[in-house]
Amino acid sequence: MKKYLVIAFAIALFKVSAQERHYSFSMDEAINFALDSSFTAVNSRREVAKALKKKWETTAAGLPQIDGVVDYQNQLKQPVSPIPAEFFGGEPGEFVPVVFGVRQQMNVSATLRQLIFDGSYLVGLQAASTFLDYNENADEKTRLEVRKAVINAYGGVLVSAERTDILRKDRATLVENLREATATFENGLSEEETVEQLQITLSQIETELSNSERMLGIAEQMLNLTLGIPVDSRVTLTDDLNDLAMKNMMLDILNEDLQIEENVDFKIAQNLTRQRELELKLEKSRALPSLNAFVNYGTTAFDQDFVFLNQETPWYQSSILGVSLNIPIFSSLMRSARTQQARIALDQSRTTFDEATQQILLEYDQARSNFRYAVEKYETSAKNLELAERIESKNQVKFREGIGSSFDLRQAQTQLYRAQEAYIVSMLDVINAKTALETILNTPDLRIEN
């Protein structure tokens, strides 16, 4: 009994520890973790693995193929054939029923087939290689998107946490202001409107704080989902929002030229165009002859009873060697129609490729502009926050000394709250804008080397 109790306790302890596993990440650590463990990244790697198997499947079609056949027949009712009786000395016009063959038969054979030449097979090998390249580039794009999603989610948690902390401090200040205003009113030294104005502001802040706390929990769950861990896991973020913003504030990246050949969307567009080229080549290859060879070896035994496992049973061997040449001659212009369709599809793909190239150039210019604007907005928000804090502080002093109204204080506090919100959002905008520009430039270079 003690033994079972110990085992049960160990299992329960293991489950609890697994459920309560605690994670701690810097942003770079979170990115590396997600690239390895996120649901999207895992399935993307599986797509590459499938493409590798598909490439081998195509290659194997041109390698020797061996098939074996074991065929057993038991004629429960053997067919009867009428034979003229005169063959056996009978009367002309009469027939004698005769059974040909034996009741049971077994045949064992093996056939080796080898493709000697087929134009479509050669094109298929090229297409399989292109398909693998496409999946590898798609995996690279997925990894860039995972990185971007982690940065956005990580920053979202930091912003929510920062917003919550600011609202708590603002609430504490308001509670103190309300306490002082209430005491002043009760002593008959101020109007009731002063207390009511502060109560309105406090109610608004408490509502915002309650919502911010809920949004923080949701942001944490979104980050966990992006990382590929249970949404209820406990995660500690070791990076600070302001430090991350300062780290991404450098404008040096604006001096980097776009190497469009390194852009993952450009490479995917190239893959798709190459696939259309191979489809056209495939349709043309269907007009070429194909040559196949085979060799067959078999052995057969007959008997009225099932004696095929006996060593004494005679087996009769046979073997065939053959070559098959298939020559397409006339298809009522069907092959020509297919070739023309593939040619049109290739022209469409080339047009789409040109469009994708221009789209990438446009996105690059937009990303540069967005990043510069995000930095400028951050600098403006920082200055505005400093001014709003000074204005609110002055109004606090005036209010406590009785020379400022609660209305003026409420306006100053509202202006401060907006400046605080704009400031923390501007830091996240800088981080996200820098990430978007890095993605287009493919600066992270998250390709997996085979």
Image (cartoon, rainbow, N blue to C red):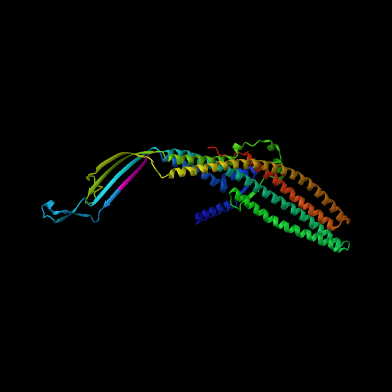
Among the 4 quarters of the image, the one containing residue 359: top right
Among the 4 quarters of the image, the one containing residue 90: bottom left
Q: Magenta-highlighted stretch: main secondary structure? A: strand
Q: Is residue 24 left or right of residue 393?
A: left
Highlighted magenta segment, given as a residue range: 63-70
Where 299 sits versus 186, above or below?
above
Q: Is residue 447 left or right of residue 105?
A: right
Looking at the image, which is closer to me, 334 or 60?
Answer: 334
Which residue is situated farthest in the front direction here?
332
Residue 101: image location, x then y, percent: 21, 50
Q: Is residue 269 visible?
A: yes
Give yes or no for residue 65 being in the magenta stretch.
yes
Residue 160: image location, x then y, percent: 69, 51
At 47% from the left and 41% from the top, the residue drawn is 55
Looking at the image, which is closer to me, 368 or 395?
Answer: 368
Q: Is residue 97 left or right of residue 183?
A: left
